[in-house]
Image: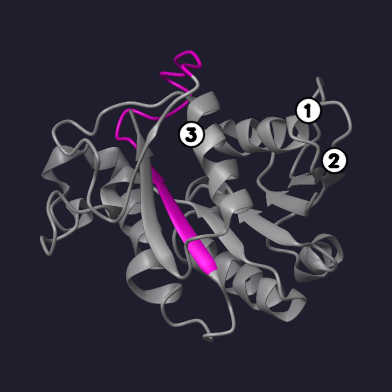
Amino acid sequence: MSRIVVIGGTGYAGSAIVAEAAARGHEVTAFSRSIPAVRVPDVTYVQGDAQDEAALTAVVSGADVVVGALAARGPLAGSAYRDVYRTIARLADAAGAPLYVVGGFSSLRPAAGAPRFAEDLSHAPAAFHGEIVITAALITDDLPATPPSLDWVFVSPAGGFGAHAPGTSRGEYRLGDDVAVQPDGGGTISGADYALGFVDLIEKGSHHRAHVNLAY
């Protein structure tokens, strides 16, 4: 079993990944700004600020796998989000651990070779434009610019993914590359099934420096 550190481990995607990985017997550490009232059994919870490099170093050191499940909003709005992920990438590389990142639907393409959805924001409410652009910058610029020694996978969910539409577990998903499995309207996937596919990706380890997506 692997030692998996989930940075942002109490958010919507992060908590689902924590629960799925722990259920499979992995040694899981959830790092976040706050500790949840209800904890997943056998998970180590560490409270800290993702902008504190010393705190990140303490949890990433010794990890077999690092998961980034942060959102580009609140304290991490704007450039802070990219700065934190640059630090996480550097620390994961130093630890020799692959980095799996919870991405966004708008980072995907509607067809092979087509512009990403993030390049035309007409599909999304204006309130989310900044978050979409910043999140997409990880896959368009920041992760590809990391040293070749860092193995990373950027995992975009369906467009309807989120706490506003948690859905129920079907025990299934479809896996695509950087072309959306469900481009029309973005499709859906529950938090549990996104986590199912996410942990499958970690365990199989068959994708390297790649952008993939999970949807029904």
The Cα–Cα distance between marks 1 and 3, rounded to whole angstroms, is 21 Å
Q: Earlier in the sequence, mark 2 or mark 3?
A: 2
Question: Over which residues does the magenta segment extend?
Answer: 152-170
Name the one closer to the observer, 136 or 172: 172
Q: Secondary structure at mark 2?
A: strand
Q: Residue at x 47, y 62 (%)?
A: 207
Name the one closer to the observer, 27 or 9: 27
| Residue 194, numbered label | 3
57 is higher (above) or lower (below) than 173:
below
Question: Residue 197 at what x, y percent from top left?
Answer: 50, 38
Q: Please count the marks in the image.
A: 3
Question: Residue 70 at what x, y percent from top left?
Answer: 56, 49
Q: Are marks 2 and 1 in contact (CB under 8 Å)?
A: yes
Kindly identify which residue carries mark 1.
36
Q: Residue at x 10, y 60 (%)?
A: 114
Estimate how packed mark 3 is, as few (under 14), some (14 to 19) or many (20 or more) residues with alpha carbons within 10 Å.
Answer: many
Quarter holding the C terminus is top left
Q: Earlier in the sequence, mark 1 or mark 3?
A: 1
> Can residue 10 be seen in this snapshot?
no
* Nearer to us: label 2 or label 3: 3
Query: Does the magenta run of residues contain 37?
Result: no
Judge from the rendering whether residue 59 lies leftward or rightward of residue 19; answer left or right: right
Kindly identify which residue carries mark 2.
45
**Quadrant of the rendered image containing residue 87:** bottom right
Q: Secondary structure at mark 1?
A: loop
